[in-house]
Amino acid sequence: MTSIRAYVRGAVAAAVLFSASTAGAVGVSLDLQKFERSDLVSAQGAMRNFVQGHSISNLHYENFESNNAWNGSFGTTNPKNTGVGNFKAYGTTGSGHSVVGDGASLAVRNDAAMPWGRYHANTPDESIVGGNWLDSNDNQGIKWRIKDKGEFNAISFFVVDAADVGGKFSIKVGDKKFSNLAGNTRLSNGNIHYVTIMLDEAVDDLTIKMGHNRNNDGFGIDGVMVAKVAPVPLPPAAALLFTGIAALAGIRHRRKSAKA
């Protein structure tokens, strides 16, 4: 398992790799944890750890099963009015061997035995095991708009089988793009990433685009969660460090004032 932290809030962060903002200057952090297909249980555990580690309200969840309110089912294309918003394809139309239909739309699928490595993940509640996932259908990417779900500041989901044909996988949150998140090497078939996106402020409308820099490098998403979470309190050591920084700043200010 590897983890890429694209942006870390706070002066106590050891390394800030990337800072970003959406329209309206809302800060964004993106965390990506990578697992092999054989370690799906650990990926599911990462989602459970996130859910259990936060105080969550206004929770919306989508596993693309036919019993959801939007009544989606296997074969549904470009699903709308799901539990977490609307999805449609963007970019170059898919034409690879895994395409179903005309290749111009996303597809809800459950043919997990197919050799190109997409499959359903799981939900935070282990008693709910779904068979469907949303497939890019070899299109360049997935465009997802979250709207009419109330205010939220946390998004998480599984990405399955990214960059196994050599494409560069990126996620754009609002107006900021996190590029080449899966690295420069061709990943193994059926790999899985657990993605967590956190916003500094709650919003009620957000567009996310995810995909490769080419078509025919298909991937799927599943276990999609949108919620509002309470800020995580600083650990005691971090709080003490902030106190020390503030004290040092005060001493320097007084010295400058005395010299003046």
Image: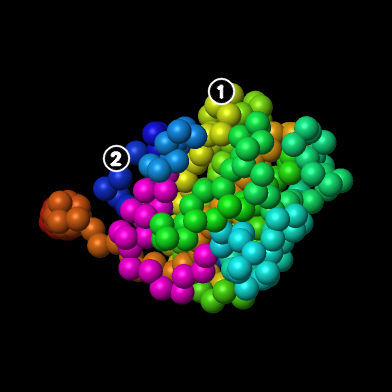
Q: Which x, y percent locates residue 19?
A: 47, 47
Label 1: state its secondary structure. Answer: loop
Q: Residue at x 46, y 70 (%)?
A: 59
On the rendered structure, is 103 left or right of 233?
right
| First to last magenta residue range | 43-61
Q: Residue at x 58, y 52 (%)?
A: 131
Q: Please check the rendered image and state whether residue 53 is part of the magenta-colored stretch, yes or no.
A: yes
Q: Which mark is residue 185?
A: 1
Q: Which x, y percent locates residue 64?
A: 61, 59
Label 2: state its secondary structure. Answer: loop
On the rendered structure, is 196 left or right of 64?
left
Q: Which residue is mark 2?
A: 14
Q: CA distance from mark 2 to mark 1?
A: 27 Å
Which amino acid does the dot numbered 2 rest on? Answer: Ala
Residue 185 in sight in this render? yes
Q: Which x, y percent locates residue 58?
A: 46, 74
- Badge 2 crowding class, 10 Å Cα cut-off, few under 14, some 14 to 19, many 20 or more, is few
Q: How many marks?
A: 2
Where is 230 relative to 174, above or below? Answer: below
Q: Quadrant of the C terminus?
A: bottom left
In front of the other: 65 or 189: 65
The residue most toward the right is 102
Q: Residue at x 48, y 48 (%)?
A: 195
